[in-house]
């Protein structure tokens, strides 16, 4: 697998991680605005003592990780929620029985938890996975709930599959209160190209763009679009997006390509917020399941954060689903738009992530791609 040149992520789940390394601004409020998952340890990173200790040298820590640690210690942000909040806690007392949501990537981990919690609060959730069997299994496992999961197939690497889903939803009169763009392809070791696009950019960005665009006029007046990004948006190419080489023909780095797709997710939500109706919102988020980033080589602050994070623990799916459930359902998120959140609170992006010119260029390039795909 490729080594990321910027960060080595440490995901600590207490005893379950067995010390292995793995992956993982505020602009305006109320405006218009086979997949490997293990991250390779780089030089300076070592197996830990059950995820609690790390050898490190000199380095820096990203803003997201400082905020994440701060929220661990402070417990909550200004809205009363933080790193320790779960999706169930955030939606406690909410009646979502009049809401219909569209959720991609429903069949594993955070997608499953998002599906479970939204239906627990009474929502009707159109739950998509690459195959109908996978989506049906996710919905069948919900158990008794006031709401319901409606399984549907949507292969985000195939435009025809996306268009078929959109056509079916439109034909049956579906109106959406929110869309959670949750599905992801992460860092295949070899370059995979489909429809002239590198797979991660195709699935993570273009597929979701096509899906959301197809349902824009079927959103409620106060609908919310939620797009899962990641601190990995900082790992993209030095120029941000390589819009002239979206098949990664010049070079392929699994993690730079993944970072590019996550930067595209962030910029898509940022610019979509500008295009929506005044009471509709669009935001991106970091799910928070990756707790500590240690640069290569590491640093004193990075090592301190690693040690503290190992002691304090990190989030399984109930916490990982918290921010997207907050954004799509909680009343206090109704006026948040065009922002990037982690642990249910807005945080700054990279410089590229706040570049409105780049967001416009991405939007226009994506429209060209969608038109070409037919």
Image: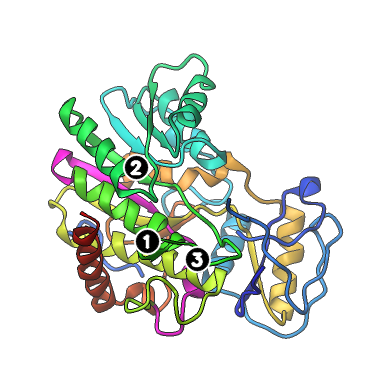
Q: Secondary structure at mark 2?
A: helix
Residue marked by disc 1: 265
Label 3–label 1 contact, CB within 8 A: no
Q: Earlier in the sequence, mark 3 or mark 1?
A: 3
Question: In front here: 2 or 374?
Answer: 374
Position above or below: 174 against 183: above
Distance CA(mark 1)–CA(mark 2) = 16 Å
Bin the neighbour count of mark 1 within 10 Å (Cα to Cα): few under 14, some 14-19, many 20 and up: many
Residue 290 image-quadrant placement: bottom right
Image quarter for residue 267?
Answer: bottom left
Q: Nearer the viewer, mark 1 or mark 2?
A: 1
Q: Is residue 199 left or right of residue 69?
A: left
Residue annotated with mark 2: 328
Q: CA distance from mark 3 to mark 1?
A: 11 Å
**Residue bounds of the magenta highlight:** 216-240
- Secondary element under disc 1, as helix, strand or loop, is helix
| Relative depth, front residue between 49 and 208 | 208
Q: Residue 197 at x, y = what percent? A: 38, 65
The residue that disc 3 covers is: 258
């Amino acid at each position: 697998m490729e080594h990321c040149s910027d960060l080595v992520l440490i995901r600590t789940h207490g005893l379950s991680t067995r010390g292995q390394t793995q992956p993982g601004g505020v602009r305006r409020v109320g405006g218009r605005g086979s997949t490997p998952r293990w991250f390779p340890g780089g030089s300076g990173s070592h197996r830990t003592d059950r995820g609690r200790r790390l050898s490190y040298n000199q380095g820096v820590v990203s803003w997201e990780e400082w905020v994440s640690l701060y929220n661990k210690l402070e417990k909550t942000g200004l809205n009363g929620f933080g790193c320790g909040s779960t999706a169930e806690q955030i939606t406690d007392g909410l009646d979502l029985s009049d809401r219909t949501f569209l959720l991609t990537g429903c069949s594993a981990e955070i997608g499953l938890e998002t599906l479970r919690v939204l239906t627990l609060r009474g929502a009707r959730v159109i739950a998509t996975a690459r195959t109908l069997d996978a989506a049906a299994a996710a919905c069948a496992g919900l158990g008794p709930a006031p709401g319901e999961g409606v399984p549907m197939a949507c292969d985000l690497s195939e435009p025809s599959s996306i268009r078929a889903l959109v056509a079916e939803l439109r034909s049956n009169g579906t109106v959406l209160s929110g869309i959670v763009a949750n599905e992801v392809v992460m860092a295949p070791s070899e370059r995979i190209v489909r429809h002239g696009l590198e797979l991660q950019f195709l699935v993570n960005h273009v597929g979701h763009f096509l899906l959301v665009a197809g349902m824009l006029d079927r959103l409620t007046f106060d609908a919310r679009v939620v797009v899962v990004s990641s601190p990995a948006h900082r790992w993209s190419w030095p120029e941000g997006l390589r819009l002239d080489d979206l098949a990664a023909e010049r070079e392929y780095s699994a993690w730079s390509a993944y970072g590019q797709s996550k930067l595209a997710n962030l910029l898509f939500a940022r610019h979509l917020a500008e295009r929506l109706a005044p009471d509709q919102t669009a935001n991106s988020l970091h799910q928070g399941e990756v707790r500590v980033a240690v640069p290569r080589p590491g640093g004193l602050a990075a090592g301190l954060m690693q040690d503290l994070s190992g002691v304090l623990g990190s989030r399984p799916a109930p916490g990982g689903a918290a921010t997207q459930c907050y954004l799509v359902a909680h009343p206090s998120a109704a006026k948040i738009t065009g922002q990037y959140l982690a642990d249910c609170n807005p945080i700054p992006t990279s410089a590229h992530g706040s570049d409105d010119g780049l967001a416009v260029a991405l939007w226009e390039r994506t429209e060209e791609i969608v038109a070409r795909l037919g």
